[in-house]
Amino acid sequence: MHGAWHGAWCWERVTPLLRDAGYQVHTPVLPGQGERIAEISTAITLNTHIDSVVSYLDVHQLNNVVLVGHSYGGAVISGVADRAAPRLRQLVYLDALVFDNGQSLASLSGPAAWATRMKAVEQAGRGVGLPPGTPESFGVTDPQDRDWVAAKLTLQPVNTFATPLILQHPLGNALPKVYIDCNAPAMASVNSFKSKVRQQSGWTYDTLASGHDAMVIVPKPLSAMLVKYA
């Protein structure tokens, strides 16, 4: 699953490599993001995104799935695993958010930071979405890559960040969990989640020499790592 402000487009360099390696690859787009930006509204929440992926798995009758979540997509795959574990084989958190039950980005940000975000929604997000950062904020510095990413980033439905993740089972719902830490350079806003994972049992932890948007920056090494955990 792609992260906030992104869409299926961000996997374009990784998908053919995985398919060449013999894997079936699906890159669904979350409602109100990326290629589905026309659907954006305040009615879209984290639950909307979780339900969308669960429905996608059901409609396409997918089983034995290695579910990858990048960044915000980590919150989505946690919710999907909670509801659809029998269709899944493993969870891969790619430089991702790892929420406890009841947490959201709004609750973790604190009132002052969230008020600043809401001001940006009103001023630059048409009242419905959080404006994206620059490509550089995602670790993308190559000029051509930077232009490509800048042209593709979209608003993030604001209530996806305001909705708490509600889990009925322990995180991961007994599925194997892998965390891939993109650490060259590390994205500061993800560091607390990495620290939490390193302190918990039940995780496989790996590192990748890349900025946050590894699928754009280092598609070949990322693909090889995903194959490693497939």
Image (cartoon, grey):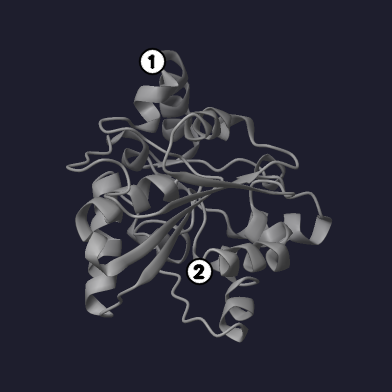
> Closer to the observer: label 1 or label 2?
2
As displayed, is residue 140 above or below residue 227?
Answer: above
Q: Position of residue 216 (x, y in %)?
A: 68, 60
Tell which residue pokes out farthest to the top in this image: 112
Q: Position of residue 49 (x, y in %)?
A: 30, 54
**Mark drawn on residue 124:** none
Mark 1 burial class by Cα count in 10 Å: few <14, some 14-19, many 20+? few
Q: Secondary structure at mark 1?
A: helix
As displayed, is residue 131 above or below residue 141?
Answer: above
Where the N terminus falls, by quadrant?
Answer: bottom left
Question: Which is nearer the eye, 69 or 88?
Answer: 88
Which badge, 1 or 2, is on the more N-terminal residue?
1
Q: Is residue 31 left or right of residue 24?
A: left
* Amino acid on which disc 1 is placed: Pro
Q: Is residue 91 visible?
A: yes
Q: Position of residue 221 (x, y in %)?
A: 71, 63
Are circles 1 and 2 on residues that touch, CB within 8 Å? no
Q: Position of residue 102 (x, y in %)?
A: 25, 30
Question: Which is nearer the eye, 129 or 47?
Answer: 47
As displayed, is residue 79 above or below residue 119?
Answer: below
| Res 75 quadrant in image | top left
Q: Is residue 190 left or right of residue 115?
A: right
- Which residue matches tag 2? 230
Which residue is depicted at the point 75% across and 60% down?
A: 145
- Which residue matches tag 1? 111
Q: Is residue 45 left or right of residue 93?
A: left
Q: Secondary structure at mark 2?
A: loop
Q: CA distance from mark 1 to mark 2?
A: 40 Å
* Amino acid on which disc 2 is placed: Ala
Q: Is residue 45 visible?
A: no
Question: Which is nearer the eye, 180 or 72?
Answer: 180
Which residue is depicted at the point 28% across and 71% down?
A: 57
